Amino acid sequence: MISTQIPKNPIKRLDVFYTLGEGVIISADVQSRTRKDLIHYSRIAIDPISLKIVKESCSCEAGAFHRKCWRLKVLEQLISSEEIKAKIEKARQEMMQIEEDIASWG
């Protein structure tokens, strides 16, 4: 029988960083809930000014058809946690510093 329960801690790796042109990225390796040995790569891009989600993707079967899976919902819920909010703000500040540096070049 295949289990459909979400693992207790499905997130195996979580990164928050900034990329020029995309914004603040939250990426994670998330364990499959039906196949314990399978890890999916999930990614959310956030607009650095409005902090709204602008793009989501996942390497799972649902993501292949551009549908929202439970892994993306888990990442969306994490955005509201204080720890992730602090990491998002740090990435935003780094982005602002880079933008200021580029503007000062000329």
Image (cartoon, rainbow, N blue to C red):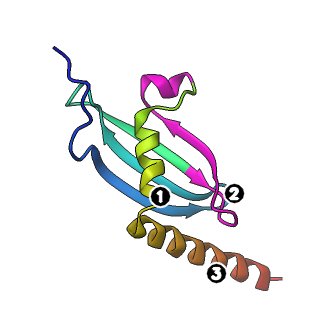
Residue positioned 20% across, 23% down in the render: 3
Q: Position of residue 83 (x, y in %)?
A: 38, 69
| SS class, disc 2 | loop
Amino acid on which the number 3 mark rests in the picture: Gln
Work out whether 101 lies above or below 56.
below
Label 2 sits on residue? 21
**Mark 3–mark 2 distance (CA, rounded to whole Å):** 15 Å
Which residue is most to the top? 1
| SS class, disc 3 | helix
Which residue is most to the right? 106
Label 1 sits on residue? 79
Stretch of the chain drawn in magenta: 45-65
Work out whether 85 lies above or below 67.
below
Q: Which mark is residue 97?
A: 3
Q: Is 42 included in the stretch rendered in magenta?
A: no
**Mark 1–mark 3 distance (CA, rounded to whole Å):** 22 Å
- 2 vs 1, front mark: 1
Work out whether 67 lies above or below 28.
above
- Pointer 3: residues within 10 angstroms few (<14), some, or many (20+)? few
Which circle's residue, 1 or 3, is located before the other in the chain?
1
- Pointer 2: residues within 10 angstroms few (<14), some, or many (20+)? few
Name the quarter where the N terminus is drawn: top left
| SS class, disc 1 | helix
